[in-house]
Image (tube, rainbow, N blue to C red):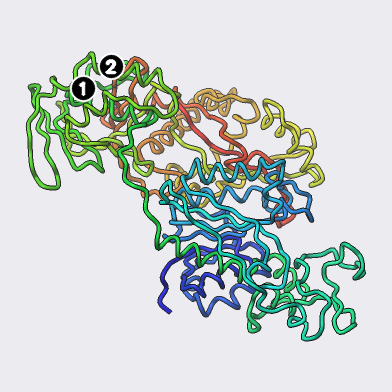
């Protein structure tokens, strides 16, 4: 079979999604499932049809450990994420369910993968209780993240397995979305079809029910007349109890689908699985919609946020001023400056060659054409000040018509320097008495809006602590603390209960690797920094460092620790991203800071001590969303131990 699309299979169970997508010509390039018994069944049935998945170690055990950017590229994300937190049969804790490997908030891992990999579509499945859980707030959060934050369209429908030919009720919420869908949204779920077979066919005898009960896990023992009965059937006048043989048919798995586990495990796995025929029917419509999808029209984005406008402002200021003053640790200009001979970005096809006069030569990299302009006729100090005030006085995303005029006169529509995967927002040819560099990368940080971040929060910046000495019965009590200082109070409550914090390390191996590239002791230092910040609410990194040192008179220790932390800050600024394994080199060798008054100053590695001191004195820890980034709660792991995660976010 020629594979026509690729997909990943998250919270894969025994592979109901895998089976359905493979039937339609899909190739599974990554899968994840934490349950050991389900993994046995998955591999036994899918190894022949997807051998590369197992040969290349792409069958992951714990989705929390993966770095999303490291996943293979794929077209469709499939996930039947854990339903127990939203199920009528469970405790309905929702996002707060931390009693089984954080299963309540694993949706946010899906969001991280969508954000990093940007596949063409997603296909999610969960219990229908998800839609109404917490008066609809849980579903609203999920939809807002998928639509507003990630930019996908969103469709959902509560579907019964019997809608697509299987003799089982099984109402489930199916959620579908597309990345490049225009405003004319037109996806439709397929119409229902008659039953392909009924429960009499399943049993091979006359059954009193045409459509069976939803296959469930546990709850056995009720008699057939009990309203809670779900697995007892009357067949040819005889009472029969559902086994995995019948459940396999009801879920749409073929007769040759094997279970290398006990019968009890087999029916549990089927109860946790998806109805294959329903998934296949909806997936067929997804593929048809992708084939006929009208892509979003490329429209010039005239609205931008403060950061995006600031990058443009820095760009044109450098064209006008043709130099960049270097800064001391307090953001004051020192006596050194860099003469600028060329300005461009990684993604701009135009380079601006600067002269000593007001002349600028605009050189098109693609067709090698050149034109000369007088920059002072387009940009002057009055215009710059107007743009500064408009950026400072606006919020969210907004339009600045004057910028559009400037860009048109300069011959380009948009600067795409602000790529979140690049450290260098702008490239400069620079020189002074000490250096002469071409295409030297500089990042841009702005104080015109809210304080910029040095390290953004994500699952990549979570760090794990094992909690010793606390009984698991206290999970809900600790996690229910919802004060204005809830993280501090939760940590103190753990200590009141006799708990101690044993530092384990970064949740993601990539972040742990990068920190060790900075210094072998850095992961341990981060653990100490996080506990001090969240327990004592000391946010300044310089102040935290002093507290780590305590009353020590050991000057060597002070110098060593301070030096390590300063190096970390520079390495984050110029070198590594939390979600990408770092090779130790810098992509950018400097940073341009736009101050609140609109002045630009720069740092460059030729004056590295100034940059180190500036960062050390101005970086503080910040608290991101605990729900969105999956930290700040006690959770019970499968090893029976309690754990707690803290997140590292650094802001100027």
The x, y position of residue 74, in whole percent, is: 44, 61
Could you tell me if residue 501 is visible in this image? yes
Label 1 neighbourhood size at 10 Å, few (<14), some (14-19), many (20+)? some
Is 438 or 13 nearer to us in this picture? 13
Q: Is residue 254 above or below residue 214?
A: below
Residue 616, x across and y down, in percent: 44, 26
Q: In front: 65, or 336?
A: 65
Q: Characterize the local packing of mark 2: few (<14), some (14-19) or many (20 or more) Cα atoms within 10 angstroms.
A: some
Check the picture and name the quadrant holding the C terminus.
top left
Judged left or right of residue 147, residue 409 is left
Residue 566's quadrant in the figure? top left
Whether residue 39 can be seen here: no
Residue to which mark 1 is pinned:
337
Judge whether 147 appears above or below 488 on screen: below
Quarter residue 309 falls in: top left
45 vs 299, nearest the viewer: 299
Towards the viewer: 360 or 249: 249
Say which element carries label 1.
Answer: strand
Q: What separation in Å lies between label 1 and label 2 (alpha carbons)?
A: 9 Å
Residue 199 percent across, percent down from the top left = 76, 77
Report the disc number at residue 333.
2
Q: Position of residue 59 (x, y in %)?
A: 54, 66
Identified at 50% across, 64% down, the residue is 285
Contact, CB < 8 Å: mark 1 with mark 2?
yes
Judged left or right of residue 561, residue 626 is right
Secondary structure beneath dot 2 equals: strand
Residue 83 - label: none
- Side of 18 where 470 appears, left or right: right
Q: Note whether 500 is above or below 255 in the view shown.
A: above
Residue shown at the point (45%, 65%) measured from the top left = 288
Quarter holding the N terminus is: bottom left
């Amino acid at each position: 079979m020629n594979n026509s699309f690729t997909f990943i299979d998250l919270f894969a169970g025994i592979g109901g999604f895998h089976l359905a997508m493979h039937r339609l010509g899909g190739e599974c390039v990554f899968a994840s499932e934490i349950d050991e018994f389900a993994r046995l069944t998955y591999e036994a049935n899918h190894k022949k049809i997807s051998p590369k998945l197992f040969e290349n170690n792409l069958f992951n055990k714990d989705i929390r450990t993966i770095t999303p950017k490291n996943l293979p590229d794929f077209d469709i994300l499939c996930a039947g994420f854990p339903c127990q937190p939203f199920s009528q049969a469970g405790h309905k804790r929702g996002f707060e369910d931390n009693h089984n490997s954080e299963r309540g908030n694993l949706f946010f891992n899906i969001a991280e993968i969508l954000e990093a990999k940007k596949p063409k579509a997603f296909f999610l499945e969960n219990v229908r209780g998800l839609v109404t859980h917490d008066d609809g707030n849980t579903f609203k959060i999920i939809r807002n993240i998928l639509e507003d934050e990630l930019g996908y369209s969103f469709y959902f429908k509560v579907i019964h397995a019997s809608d697509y030919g299987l003799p089982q009720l099984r109402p489930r919420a199916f959620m579908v979305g597309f990345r490049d869908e225009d405003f004319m949204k037109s996806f439709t779920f397929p119409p229902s079809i008659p039953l392909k077979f009924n429960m009499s066919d399943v049993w091979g005898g006359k059954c009193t029910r045409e459509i069976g009960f939803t296959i469930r896990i546990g709850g056995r023992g009720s008699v057939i007349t009990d309203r809670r009965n779900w697995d007892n059937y009357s067949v040819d006048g005889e009472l029969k109890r559902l086994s995995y043989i019948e459940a396999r048919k009801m879920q749409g798995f073929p007769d040759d689908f094997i279970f290398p586990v006990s019968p009890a495990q087999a029916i549990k796995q089927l109860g946790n699985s998806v109805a294959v025929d329903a998934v296949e029917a909806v997936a067929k419509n997804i593929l048809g919609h992708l084939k006929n999808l009208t892509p979003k029209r490329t429209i010039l984005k005239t609205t931008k946020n403060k950061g995006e406008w600031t990058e443009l402002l820095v760009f044109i200021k450098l064209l006008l001023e043709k130099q960049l003053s270097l800064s001391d640790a307090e953001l004051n200009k020192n006596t050194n400056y860099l003469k600028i001979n060329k300005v461009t970005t990684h993604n701009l096809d135009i380079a601006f060659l600067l002269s000593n006069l007001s002349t600028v030569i605009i050189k098109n990299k693609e067709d090698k054409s050149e034109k000369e302009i007088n920059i002072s006729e387009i940009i002057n100090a009055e215009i710059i000040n107007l743009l500064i005030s408009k950026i400072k006085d606006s919020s969210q995303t907004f339009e600045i018509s004057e910028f559009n005029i400037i860009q048109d006169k300069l011959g380009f529509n948009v600067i795409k320097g602000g790529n979140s995967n690049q450290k260098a927002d702008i490239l400069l040819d620079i020189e002074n008495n000490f250096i002469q560099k071409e295409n030297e990368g500089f990042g841009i940080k702005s104080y015109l809006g809210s304080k910029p971040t040095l390290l953004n929060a994500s699952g990549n910046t979570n760090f794990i602590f094992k909690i010793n000495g606390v009984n698991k019965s206290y999970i809900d009590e600790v996690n229910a603390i919802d004060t204005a200082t809830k993280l501090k109070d939760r940590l103190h409550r753990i200590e009141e209960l006799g708990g101690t914090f044993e530092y384990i390390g970064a949740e993601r191996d990539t972040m742990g690797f990068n920190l060790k590239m900075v210094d072998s002791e850095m992961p341990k230092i981060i653990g100490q920094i996080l506990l001090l910040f969240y327990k004592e609410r000391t946010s300044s990194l310089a102040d935290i460092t002093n507290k780590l040192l305590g009353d020590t008179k050991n000057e060597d220790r002070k110098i060593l620790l301070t030096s390590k932390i300063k190096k970390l800050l520079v390495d984050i600024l110029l070198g590594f991203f939390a979600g990408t394994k770092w090779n130790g080199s810098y992509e950018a060798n400097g940073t341009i800071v736009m101050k609140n008054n609109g002045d630009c100053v720069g740092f460059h590695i030729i004056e590295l001590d100034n940059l180190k001191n500036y960062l050390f004195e101005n970086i503080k820890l910040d608290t991101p969303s605990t729900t969105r980034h999956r930290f700040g709660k006690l959770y019970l792991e499968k090893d029976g131990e309690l754990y707690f995660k803290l997140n590292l976010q650094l802001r100027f």
